[in-house]
Image (cartoon, rainbow, N blue to C red):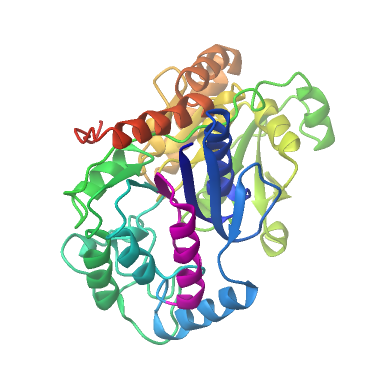
Amino acid sequence: MLKLLQICVEGNTGSTGRMAEAIGNLAIQRDWESYIAYGRFPRPSSSNLIRIGSDIDVVLHGIETRIFDNHCFSSRAATIRLVKRIIDIKPDIIHLHHLHGYYINIRVLFNFLSDYDRPVVWTFHDCWSFTGHCAHFDFIGCERWKTQCYSCPQKGEYPASYLFDRSRRNYLLKKSLFTSVKKMVIVPVSNWLGSIVKDSFMGSIPIKRIYNGIDTSIFEPQKNSKSVRDKYGIGNKFMIIGVASPWTKKKGLNDFFELCKLLNENQVVVLVGLNKLQLKQLPEKIIGLSKTENRQELIDLYSAADVFVNPTWEDNFPTTNLEALSCGTPVVTYRTGGSLEAISSDTGFIVEKGDISGLSDVIKKVESSGKDFFLPNCRKRALENYDKNDRFEEYFVLYNDLLHNKRSLSYEY
């Protein structure tokens, strides 16, 4: 019986944790043994869960990060114990997801992986793996990651360090560790991220792009739009929705504030995922909602909206775009990272970053055409391209290729 072991910061919660769980479920359906090693926040799982360290380990790792810029070089004892478990399990495939998140020691892990004679698949959800510190650099336009990081301009950003800057050391250590694994394939979740990886120190490692997927059987158009609109006093107004958690300047919160100045009396914005302070500071034309753990409520909101607007300034391949499309709602996004890859000319619009009047103009186009013009194409695109079962099936094609030593993998545009 083949064995799959995944490593993820969260256990069946959060976007990457749920992704690992879904892949584990597919493995079980194929009569594989499935293991998921995680850092925190476990929920019941069909796979065999392995906790890496403890809550105290996570706290101590966070403290070291804040002081010494030592992220992912703490949790040594916890990672040694994990390696011993992996040796006992003898997985045929090791699949890595987010390694950052205050729970694992990459030096210990990759020293082991470099000697482990089994394939490793590593899904990239952001850029942390090839920088000396940050998970995203697009917002500030930093390109030090292409040659060698130093004096990080985002030292105070996640994973924040308030004293030391060891971005140069971290960059060199990552480069040495991450390029030492002979049987590894990188899976970026967007074409944009794949092209970035190609320009990094990991550019010589085989790459296979696999888009994220969602549960299109759950995220689907609902028929209760009137009740949702009545609940929030929207009525027949043109409803613009934005979803993020947390909302920041990088996610486009300030852009929504500016957009409100250009809206007419028949247009209203609903923002989901705001914190208490943000809820108190909203302009009159914005209806603010806190983060919802009720997935059905989110689906109802997507379905009730006329357009989903995602003015993100840095992103890889936002799941919110896919969720909106699957609920039949057209998407408007900035030309940011892989965000634009989710949509086509008949399912939404792309606007240049910071072009508020451009946002207003395309929103008017959606309003003029009517949501029904876009709905069938949005739903079709989601079903054909972003159904989670189809996308996660690609991982098993990749696993089998690796198990049979098929190494002719390349980045797909």
Residue bounds of the magenta highlight: 74-102
Q: Position of residue 56 (x, y in %)?
A: 62, 78
Q: Looking at the image, is 190 positioned above or below residue 224?
A: below
Residue 98 in the magenta stretch? The answer is yes
Q: Looking at the image, is 343 positioned above or below residue 91?
A: above
Residue 285 or residue 269, whichever sits in front: 269
Residue 311 or residue 404, whichever sits in front: 404
Q: Position of residue 129 (x, y in %)?
A: 33, 59
Residue 335 or residue 343, whichever sits in front: 343
Q: For the C terminus, which image quadrant?
A: top left
Residue 198 in the magenta stretch? The answer is no
Quarter location, residue 206: top left
- Relative to 166, is 158 on the left or the right? right
Residue that appears at 44% across and 64% down: 83
Q: Position of residue 90 (x, y in %)?
A: 43, 51
Residue 366 or residue 320, whichever sits in front: 320
- Relative to 123, is 64 on the left or the right? right
Q: Position of residue 207 (x, y in %)?
A: 26, 41
